[in-house]
Image: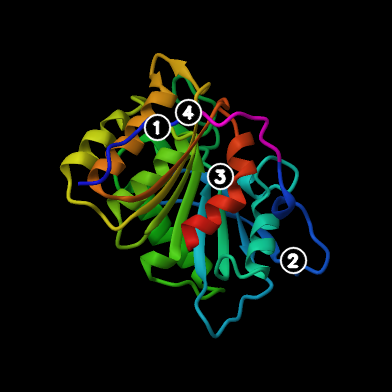
Amino acid sequence: MPEKFVIPVPKPGPFVLGADSQRQPGVPRGSVTKHEWRSSIFPGTERNFWVYVPAQYKADSPACVMVFQDGGGYVSEDGNLRVPVVFDNLIHKKEMPVTIGIFIDPGTVPGAPPPPGHDGSQRSIEYDTLSDQYARFLLEEILPAVSQTHRLTSSPEGRAICGMSSGGICSWTVAWERPDAFGKVLSHVGSFANIRGGHVYPTLIRKTTRKPIRIFLQAGSNDLDVGWGHWPLANLEMAAALNFAGYDYRLDYGDGEHNGQHGGAILPESLVWLWR
């Protein structure tokens, strides 16, 4: 049995971006291209997605791949996360492998009324639902589309997935449903709450044979406390369950709120840990 899980003392902020989240002289820049996608797995939806290709990518060797939900926020170089900048710096220093990034926005249905309680996107339907539908969307639509122009590894050890809030639980669901396809998860303030039943995961983790998934959880003690649940407690319960079941996991627990400040500040560290 693993050591008993101990609730950590929240790490105090402020959480600031370090050198690996800033452009550095002499570091080759990868390229980012924007695309549109109409899905058949989520019928009627349209969305934008972006593909980052590192300067070190060579077509004769398959690259690792990392998928990001709410892609527009993660691909931006002006916000808290700045993934292309971090990838450039870490790949240049060989602290993570040559990795193609895929940044996907949630789908919208043009002309359709928004789902009750949500904006015009299908975000909660896609991200918070506990099923293999989003995993199939990635494996049957998005990854094959990117593979038409770039060689991607098929090994789950070379595939990672990341998201914030509902994107965090979505990332876990993809790996949980298809550990043969995604072996690494990074969750920022993940919504492991009862939005669409996600509160069941700690019990499922405890009662299911351990799956080959490595996961980094970032959570904050001042995160949401609303009708759907208590986000800090939900993330602590996830960590305790992962510990109980013997997963390769890490929890970074700060005093932050429901935003990307803490996750962005530790993004380089979390990626190095995830890809070690």
Alpha carbon distance from label 1 to label 3? 24 Å
Residue 39 locus on image (x, y percent): 45, 51
**Closer to viewer: mark 1 or mark 3:** 1
In the image, what residue type sits under mark 2?
Answer: Arg
Query: Which of marks 3 and 2 precedes in the sequence?
Result: 2
- Nearer to us of marks 2 and 3 is 2
Q: Residue at x 45, y 35 (%)?
A: 190
| Residue bearing the label numbered 2 | 29
Residue 178 in percent (x, y) is at: 30, 56
Measure how far apart labels 4 and 1 are at the Cα level: 14 Å
Q: Residues within 10 Å of mark 2 (few under 14, many from 20)?
A: some
Compared to residue 226, the image places residue 50 above or below, namely below
- Within the magenta stretch, is there residue 171? no
Which label sits on residue 235? 1
- The residue wearing badge 4 is 9
State the residue in front, 124 or 27: 27
Write down the region rendered in magenta.
Answer: 10-16
Dot 3 falls on a residue whose secondary structure is loop
Q: Which residue is mark 3?
A: 105
Q: Residue at x 60, y 45 (%)?
A: 266
Residue depicted at x 48% and y 28%: 9
